[in-house]
Amino acid sequence: MAKIRLYEIAKELNVDNKAVVQKAKELGVDVRNHMSSVEEAAASRIKNSLKGNAPAEKNEEKKKTSKIKISVSSIRKNEKPEKKKPKTNRRARRDHAAKRNEQQKRNNEQRKTPSAKPAARDLLTKFKQKQRAEAGKLDQIAKKAKEEYHEHLHKKNKPAEEPVKAEKPQEKAASKAETNKQETGRTIGPKILKPSPARLKKAAPAADKTAKPSRPHTPKPVAAPTNEDRRKNSFGKNTGKPGRKGRNTNFGSGRSEHSDKQERRKRKNRKRQAEAPKKPMTQRKERPLPDTLVYEVGMNAQDLGKILHREPAEIVKKLFMLGIMTNQNQSLDKDTIELLAAEYNIEAQEKVHEDISDIDKVYEKLAKQAKEAKHQVKRPPVVTIMGHVDHGKTTLLDRLRHTNVSEHEAGGITQKIGAYQVRVDDRLITFLDTPGHAAFSNMRARGAEITDIVVLVVAADDGVMPQTIEAIDHAKSAKVPIIVAINKMDVPGANPQHVTEQLMKYNLIPEDYGGDTIYVNISAKTGENVDELLQMILLQADVLELKANPKQKAIGTVVEARLSRGRGPVADILVEEGTLHVGDPIVVGNTFGRVRVMTNDHGKQVKKATPSMPIEITGLNDVPESADKLVVFDDEKTARSVGEARASQALQKARENVQHVTLDNLFDTMKKENMKEVDIVLKADVQGSVEALQQSLEKIEVEGVRVNIIHSGAGAINESDVTLAGASNAFIIGFNVRPTATAKSQAETEGVDIRLYSIIYKAIDDVTAAMKGMLEPTYEEKVTGNLTVRETWKVSKIGTIAGAFVDSGYVTRDSGIRLIRDGVVIYDGKVASLKRFKDDVKEVKQGFDCGLTIDGYNDIKVDDQLEAYEMQEVKPQ
Ligand SMILES: Nc1nc2c(ncn2[C@@H]2O[C@H](COP(=O)(O)OP(=O)(O)OP(=O)(O)O)[C@@H](O)[C@H]2O)c(=O)[nH]1
């Protein structure tokens, strides 16, 4: 319910505020001063009791409609600016809003009335017309009063033009407000002077609601005042202080009580601020350091600052104190970062980048995840059959495949996909179709341990044989339990007891003898006891508690893979964990793709494959190798990039591993690779030389190893020769020929050895010696020093002694020496003697003089150049 303030009552009745307060107190209304607000009922009580005291003209005015009253009072505000406070503060606005609501209510009532009674409507129309006429008169009065006031004010405070300037917009706004007021049927009051766009936005619909549709509300003129207007409205009171200062002004009002208060408050604040002790510079609140600094090598102070919640400058300073000069952008090494962490007294931990191209790691992670999963379910055991040759492994596998497949499953015909499943009651057993321990261990060697149980087949008529023992060792080293199947029980002379006794030596103790190895006597040929064997496998599987999590991304292993005509690369996969779906993006070994078609061991297309299920898949970009791991990725793009990265890594590795045979490593390679032939590409200047050399080389035979000329021809050694030698692990012999530039660089890149000769027997000797492992080391000339002859002495019996200065390097007593005159080598020989003054010396270095003689040469002249050189051994690459 709207409340009315006492000063409003006082204003309305044109009585003193005190009188109203007094009256209210007399009437028992709880009020403190003229600002106190009272309920409407109380207000009317106060008004009624005050009416007797009110001046007659006011009482007369009171009889007018409240609308007029408000209008008049709002104008009178202008007439009595000293008393009237601008209602710009929140409370004033609230009061105004309350008044407006009240007025609206009344208007609505008035609007409702005509619809009820037409006679009353006429009356109301007349009344309104009268109101308008009166309002027009009042407007004129107000205008006049304002003009008078401004004139008065102008005389008092301001230069001549200013009030005029200020008045214009003011007046405009006032008249617009009046128009608006008349149109909307409500008083806008002081608010019209300082409407904010936001408030206008809100006010517009509100006004629309109250206004009759035929009289649209036009807020534009109200919104019009510009900053300039506002500044002018301040009437010099706050001149020079733009903005909100103007809000506290009213029509021509001077310094109000309210603004005085504000001024006082401001002065007080300023004084308090000046008196208050100066606060120290606000320290930036530092966030706590992390417990561990997880870093990457190469991070800079800025990066570390972010992690440590410290300013980079602080990091730089800290490092500086530690004796490390750096800036904010300089990459830091591991040691520096760890040192910094130690300085902050926190742990440092290097961020490990997960290399998704290492699918073995991804595989292990998924396998571990599966082992820890809650949704683990029983999975079929995976069985490998091992045993000695001809003991019946294949026969047993065939029997199982054909007898234990239900009729409805692809008509009983199984697909050969490297593994198959056998149904026993309602359970399945997966058999790997590659019997023997070689395949088993090859898979193991490549990290594929997919077998859960080994069935060791031993022929009852043959007993334990070498490969039986090997199989036992392989199974034991893989820690896979063994079930012994003593086969060929149908053969007369079968002696299972003897076999058992033999196997007991290998710690395969049957349960009857207190051990835990299961023995089953079977006949793979007749099928006798084969079901019993299957039951025993299931029993062993139960003991092993084989479980897997089908509710995750699949991992698996390639059992076999091949290139199929029409279908492309085909891989037989054994799913180990998770469920593999058609469409899954996969990486298999170094290949990648999407599972296109998935076929089970009965040749039936399936949409998904669960753990221990062997399936054949297509959709890979290349043929993987057996024992390769299968990993499912989130998307094909990742799978492709991982697959491609792995393929290129594998290629790089393969290249690195190929060590081409060279003449220097020929002997070792022959031994290591058990070579029977030494492959050579032979090129010579003419066909005659080619034939002569070929015949000689092909005659070489060292310990049963012969030379095989894989290609020969006349002409320079070209790229095709190098490619051929590279692919065949051969080396190249060139007789009086040279390799082309590209062939030379290609040979260097691919590590192909090219040997060049100009003497046939030297080539033959080298090849023979290399094959015997006796190839002499190669020497290379190296110039060690340059000398200039400055003087010569001829001594009888000794010859010519050259007095020379070592310009660069050094010369030794054992050096080879070349005499160069005018750029031409005159003589090439050896140093005979080397002296410094009268003493023999071993070596004379740059910057010194020496006396030397050349062995067998005396025609040494002043200014001759001497080149000292040595033959140094070139180590084989
Ligand atoms: N009488 C009889 N002969 C059998 C039995 N099981 C296998 N044979 C025969 O033994 C021979 C060898 O059998 P395979 O199944 O080929 O033996 P394997 O162990 O697979 O031999 P490899 O593949 O060479 O390692 C075949 O002629 C089979 O017919 C059996 O239970 N009884």
Image: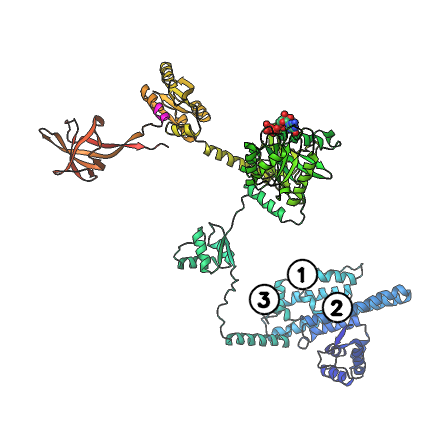
Residue 344: % across, % down = 46, 60
Residue 78: % across, % down = 69, 73
CB at disc 3 and ligand 1 closer than 8 Å: no
User: What's the mark number on residue 187?
Assistant: 2
Q: Earlier in the sequence, mark 2 or mark 3?
A: 2
Residue 404, relative to residue 304: is it above or below?
A: above
Q: Residue at x 72, y 74 (%)?
A: 76
Question: In the picture, which quadrant includes the N terminus?
Answer: bottom right
Total marks shown come to 3
Q: Which residue is mark 3?
A: 242
Q: Are marks 2 and 1 in contact (CB under 8 Å)?
A: no
Apparent side of residue 485 relative to residue 298 in the rendered image (left or right): right
Q: Are marks 3 and 1 in contact (CB under 8 Å)?
A: no
Q: Nearer the viewer, residue 332 or 727?
A: 727
Q: Amino acid at mark 3?
A: Pro
**Circle 2 sits in a helix, a strand or a loop, which is it?**
loop
Between tags 3 and 1, which lies in front?
A: 1
Which quarter holds ligand 1? top right
Is 770 a magenta residue?
yes
Residue 447: % across, % down = 55, 39
Q: Earlier in the sequence, mark 2 or mark 1?
A: 2
Q: Which residue is mark 1?
A: 197
Residue 139, relative to residue 815: is it above or below?
A: below
Q: Which residues are magenta?
A: 768-773
